[in-house]
Amino acid sequence: MSTRQPTPLEDQPISVRAKLAAAWTSFMFLYAYVDILAFYKPGVVDGIQAGVIWEFQVSQELLTTFLALMAIPISMVVLSMTLPARANRITNLAVAAVQVPFAAFNAVGESWTFFYGLGVALELVVLALILRCAWTWPRTTPRATSPDRGTVPAHHLA
């Protein structure tokens, strides 16, 4: 029997961009799966086949609206990985903040409170993570100048 201790695993830091893209991906899956699983509620498929979603008539405009709403978190996955840091931070803060009331709206008037409540709660947790990651985005180390050496990273002056 070996008494050797296992070598600790390396816990590499994850970039803010990757955290945000992963969070938006998770949000997108939650958003979609709440809708997909809702098809199993009695009467939902019958309503869709009759041309009604919730209380709305199925139309090109309604489905285009749904697609546009779903395109927001989908786009945020790509934007989180590609926008410059400052624009990325601002965009994530703004879009996540706007998504909070949309997420909460899904539970309004629903009789399946456990199902929709859990879906909304999970979406809100992910949105809170997005807001936190974007809000606490690390800043670059300020650079100071040295009279004899020019610009020097601040951590070398301490």
Image (spheres, rainbow, N blue to C red):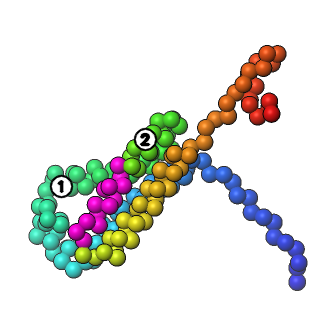
Q: CA distance from mark 2 to mark 1?
A: 26 Å
- Residue at left offset 15%, top offset 53%: 60
State the predominant SS element of the stretch in magenta: helix
Single out the residue that lies furthest toward the bottom.
Answer: 1
Q: Would you name the residue on which mark 1 appears?
A: 62
- Which residue sits at x=21%, y=80%? 42
Q: Secondary structure at mark 2?
A: helix
- Residue 115: give x, y in percent of width and height: 34, 74
What segment carries the magenta color? 98-110
* Towards the viewer: 142 or 23: 142
Q: Which mark is residue 94?
A: none
- From the viewer's perspective, tell me whether residue 119 is left or right of residue 151: left
Can residue 60 be seen here? The reply is yes
Of 96 and 64, which appears nearest the observer? 96
> Which residue is found at the position 28% from the left and 60% from the top?
105
- Residue at 67% from the left image edge and 30% from the top image edge: 142
- The quadrant of the rendering that contains the N terminus is bottom right
Residue 33 appears in the picture as rendered: no
Amino acid type shown at disc 2:
Thr
Q: Which mark is residue 91?
A: 2
Please determine whether, in this image, residue 62 is positioned above or below residue 1.
above
In the image, is 70 to the left or to the right of 43?
Answer: right
Q: Of the two numbered discs 2 and 1 on the same chain, state the one appearing first in sequence.
A: 1
Give the vertical position of 47 relative to 90 (above or below).
below
